[in-house]
């Protein structure tokens, strides 16, 4: 039976730590950190995420602004809005909620955000710094995963981390972070994906298994080594007529099965997703500190 890695508790501790730091800034008469979140279109999940991020900011004293743009916003209009915030001293962090509508080039958008305000850590300059182990903004979900492992004192040095998924948001950055020669990382890393002929051949070798595939309950107990640490990044909505909303959230891991075999496991909801939100706040605070020299 596994120990549940409580993302809700850690996220709440991180928020309390940041809230205290911001309270001190205010008491010294300093300006506070500011974050602008840009949402394009009507994706219901994105609307929920942006609104939660804004509420999180308000809760801990970060100045927050949401720019909601219609679905038919042109790429140039979006780029111009980003340029405006690049030069606005009241906002130290800029995030553009993904995914974007199909007519907008995601890479051009990310490249337009000035790297010093790129609190998502998606800009190629920040990605490059991460790969070579330089100080940078870590993308929020991988940063959250590393923080969970750290707060539960889970040994990572010399351990085999297997990442299932190769997205720019989770798979690639978390693999690079775990590879770094530093405390809380220093792991042997394997990245696998949908082209693997026999995925369980890889997953069964994992001391720490990170599932970021986007397929509900895909990782079964038979694919996991006894005593492995299992980190579930999936957030899948599946139909459930017994709930008020008509759906239920499940991860990429078959939680009930894998719980019996793992040593530690993250739940969905209440695991990595909440950490993603908390680490965005930390990145915003760090952006503020770097820009203001505080
Ligand atoms: N610009 C970005 N876009 C996207 C990112 C990102 O990091 N930056 N990641 C995902 C979505 N995401 C944040 O934006 C995100 C996902 C999940 C959660 C979360 O709190 N999950 C909860 C469940 C919430 C629910 O009811 O849906 C949990 O797991 O407990 C927060 C943020 C894609 N886009």
Image (spheres, rainbow, N blue to C red):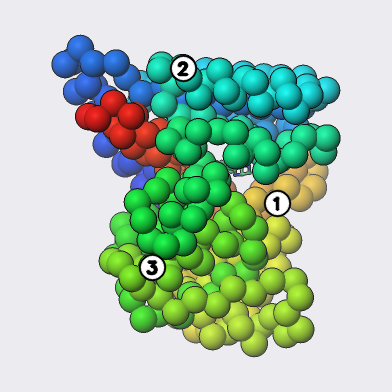
For label 2, the SS is loop
Q: Quadrant of residue 109?
A: top right
Q: CA distance from mark 2 to mark 1?
A: 36 Å
Residue at image coords 68%, 62%: 213
Which of labels 1 and 3 is toward the front?
A: 3
66 left or right of 10 in image: right
Q: Which residue is mark 3?
A: 180
Q: How would you rate the neighbour count of disc 3 (Cα within 10 Å): few for under 14, some for 14-19, many for 20 or more?
A: some
For label 1, the SS is strand
Return the x and y of residue 261 as percentages of the image width and height: 52, 78
Q: Ligand 1 closer than 8 Å to the CB at disc 1?
A: no
For label 3, the SS is loop
Residue at image coords 38%, 68%: 180
State the residue lying farthest toward the left: 28
Q: Which mark is residue 236?
A: 1
The number of numbered discs placed on residues in the rendered structure image is 3
Which of labels 2 and 1 is toward the front?
A: 2
Q: Which residue is mark 2?
A: 88
Mark 2 vs 1: CB contact within 8 A? no
The disc, 2 or 3, on the residue closer to the chain's N-terminal end is 2
Q: CA distance from mark 1 to mark 3?
A: 30 Å
Residue at image coords 60%, 80%: 203
Q: Quadrant of residue 288?
A: top left
**Camera sees residue 258:** no
Q: Is residue 189 above or below residue 3?
A: below
């Amino acid at each position: 039976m596994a120990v549940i890695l409580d993302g809700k508790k850690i996220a709440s501790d991180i928020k309390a730590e940041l809230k205290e730091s911001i309270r001190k800034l205010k008491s010294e008469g300093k300006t506070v950190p500011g974050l602008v979140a840009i949402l394009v279109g009507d994706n219901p999940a994105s609307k929920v995420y942006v609104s939660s991020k804004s509420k999180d900011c308000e809760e801990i004293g970060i100045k927050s602004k949401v720019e909601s743009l219609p679905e038919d916003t042109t790429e140039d209009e979006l780029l111009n809005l980003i340029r405006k915030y690049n030069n606005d001293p009241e906002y130290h962090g800029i995030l553009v909620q993904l995914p974007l509508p199909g007519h907008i080039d995601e890479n051009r958008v990310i490249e337009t955000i000035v790297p010093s305000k790129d609190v998502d850590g998606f800009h190629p300059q920040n990605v490059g710094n991460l790969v070579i182990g330089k100080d940078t903004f870590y993308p929020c979900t991988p940063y959250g995963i590393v923080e969970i492992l750290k707060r539960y004192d889970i040994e990572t040095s010399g351990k085999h981390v297997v990442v299932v998924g190769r997205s720019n948001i989770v798979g690639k950055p978390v693999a690079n972070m775990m590879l770094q020669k530093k405390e809380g990382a220093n792991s042997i890393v394997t990245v696998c994906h949908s082209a693997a002929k026999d995925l369980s051949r890889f997953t069964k070798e994992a001391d720490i298994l990170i599932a970021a595939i986007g397929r509900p309950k895909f990782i079964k107990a038979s694919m996991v080594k006894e005593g492995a640490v299992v980190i579930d990044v999936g957030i899948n909505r599946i139909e459930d007529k017994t709930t008020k909303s008509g759906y239920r959230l499940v991860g990429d891991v078959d939680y009930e099965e894998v719980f019996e075999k793992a040593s530690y496991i993250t739940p969905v909801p209440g695991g990595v997703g909440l950490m993603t939100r908390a680490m965005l706040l930390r990145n915003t605070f760090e952006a503020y500190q770097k820009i203001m020299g505080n």
